[in-house]
Image (cartoon, helix red, strand yellow):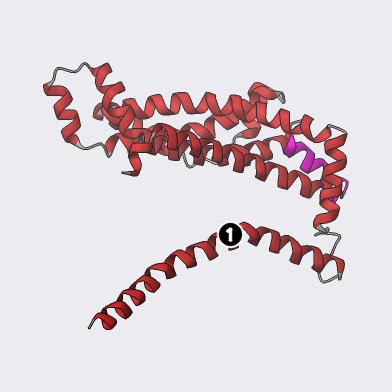
Amino acid sequence: MSTATTILTEDELRRLKTPARREKLFRFASYFSPLLLLLIWELSSQFNLIDRRFFPAPSAIAETAWRMIVSLELFEHMGATLRRVGIGYMMGAIPGITLGLILGLSQPARRILGPIFSALYPVPKIAILPLILLIFGVGDASKFVVIAIGVFFLMFYNTMGGVLQTPQIYMDVAKNAGASRFQTFTRIAFPAALPSIFTGLKLAAGSSYIIIAAAEFLGARSGVGFFIWASWQTFAVSRMFVGIVVISVMGYLTILALEALERHFVAWAKN
């Protein structure tokens, strides 16, 4: 009997260890899968399995990137793009969050203004870029505005949705306790909407880089988007790939930073 019990316990332990081992394997694969992809790409390019005119080897792209880093050219374009994204992002996020909280708490305001936002949201932001360029010129002001518009709607809808999902009992308790509208706004609605707000912030960050790349294609003399477009015009494919990789990394690092802030400020949401 004791032997059977021992064998059963070992089997259970083995079954318990299997998911942990599988998780370690998946984690290991996630670390090295990008490197494996680069290796396949490099070998395919070296052995002429793909057209190097359109897909240069990663080693050639890395060499081009290094030359641009040494000459500081890459940092100049990155700085211009980051400045435009940062300013436009704040211009859109702050009013988007504020109006999302207000309309989430006020049903009359939601009924009056909601249809207006619903009608404007589907309009492609790049489609109105010519109008924005006409009004604000080809300088940085037009880049700020087009990014702000794209960010605003994402923040507005995510914030308002977060407020509307707040359990009504919290609002009732605040009302019975004599909380003012401002206290309800800051103590109930805003904290309850924070998870949705951070979701909106991450979505808006990705959209910001998409919008700025397109905006810099049309009306800029600096920035990663301008650099990609200029490389395409001269058929400098390696330089174009450098720009694509750089804007991807910039967006990825921005989202990582927002996720770190989310873990710090909204740790309670995991529970």
Quadrant of the rendered structure where residue 263 is?
top left
Residue 255 screen position, x and y as percent: 55, 40
Give the magenta-colored segment's residue range: 223-238
SS state under label 1: helix
Position of residue 32 in the picture relative to residue 240 (left or right): left
Q: Where, by quadrant of the figure, is residue 30 drawn?
A: bottom right
Residue 129 seen in the figure: yes
Q: Is residue 204 left or right of residue 140?
A: left
Task: Tell me what residue is drawn at x 31 percent, y 74 percent.
Answer: 9
Q: Where does the image place residue 240, in percent across and percent down from the top left?
A: 79, 47
Nearest the eye: 44 or 107: 44
Question: Could you tell me the amino acid type at mark 1?
Answer: Ser
Residue 127, visible in the rendered structure: no
Q: Residue at x 35, y 77 (%)?
A: 11
Image coords of residue 43 (percent x, y): 81, 67
Query: Looking at the image, which residue is at 19% across and 31% down?
Result: 170
Q: Kindly give the residue lying farthest to the front in the view shown.
A: 2
As drawn, 78 above or below 247: above
Residue lying at 21% horizontally and 16% vertically, measured from the top left: 180
Quadrant, the N terminus: bottom left
Where residue 115 appears, as percent x and y from the top left, is 36, 35
Quickly name the residue at label 1: 30
Other residues around mark 1 within 10 Å, as few (<14) / some (14–19) / many (≥20): few
> Does the segment drawn in magenta span residue 151?
no
Q: Is residue 85 left or right of residue 49?
A: left
- Look at the magenta stretch and give its main secondary structure: helix
